[in-house]
Amino acid sequence: MEEKLSDTPIPFSELLKEIDVKPKVSAYVLIEADPALIPTIIEELSRIENVRSADVVTGVYDIITFIEAEDPNEIGRVVIRQINPIKGVNKATTCMVVKI
């Protein structure tokens, strides 16, 4: 007997229910920087494991970075221990992504 395929698509969550996938948290880090050191800062940011992107922008901030982590505390540790100490980073404002 031939197996009939369902007419409706299987939800993505149903496909992944057998896989142990931890949801990640993410944040944008808005960086005010010394303009002369921006290239060096971008290079340093690219070496941080949690950093997914870093873009030089115009306006109030000089660099906007997108980071992901396992939990909000890890986001805080990345910003405090790895981003703030970079030479030329004057201020880093963290904006946590929320789901509404």
Image (cartoon, rainbow, N blue to C red):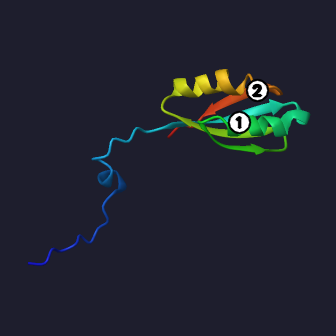
Query: Which quadrant would the N terminus be assigned to in this image?
Result: bottom left
Mark 2 or mark 1: name the one nearer the start of the chain. Answer: 1
**Contact flag, marks 2 and 1 (Cβ < 8 Å):** yes
Give the left or right position of residue 97, taking residue 80 as reference. Answer: left
User: Which residue is most to the left?
Assistant: 1
Type of amino acid at the residue the image marks with label 2: Ile
Residue 85 appears at what percent x and percent y? Answer: 74, 22
Which residue: 23% across, 70% down?
A: 6
Residue at x 34% of width, y 51% of height: 13
- Image-quadrant location for residue 35: top right
User: How many numbered marks does the figure carry?
Assistant: 2
Q: Residue at x 65, y 21 (%)?
A: 81
| Callout 2 secondary element | loop
Rendering coords of residue 38 (x, y %): 84, 37
**Residue at the spot of label 1:** 45
Instruction: Give the SS element for disc 1.
Output: helix
Q: CA distance from mark 2 to mark 1?
A: 8 Å
Which amino acid type corresponds to the residue marked 1 in the rendered image? Leu
Asked if residue 61 can be seen in this view, the reply is no
Which residue was labeled with disc 2?
86
* Residue lying at the far right of the rendered structure: 36
Can residue 58 be seen at all in this image of the molecule? yes
**On the rendered structure, is 9 left or right of 65?**
left
12 is higher (above) or lower (below) than 91: below
Task: Report whether 51 appears left or right of 35.
Answer: left
Q: Is residue 27 left or right of residue 8?
A: right
Q: Quadrant of residue 20?
A: top left
Please tell me which residue lies in front, 58 or 20.
Answer: 20
Classed neighbour count for the residue bearing mark 2: other residues with Cα under 10 Å, few (<14), some (14–19), many (≥20): some
Q: Where residue 42 sits in the image (x, y, percent)?
A: 77, 39
Q: Position of residue 79 (x, y in %)?
A: 65, 26
Disc 1 crowd rating (10 Å Cα; few below 14, some 14-19, many 20+) is some
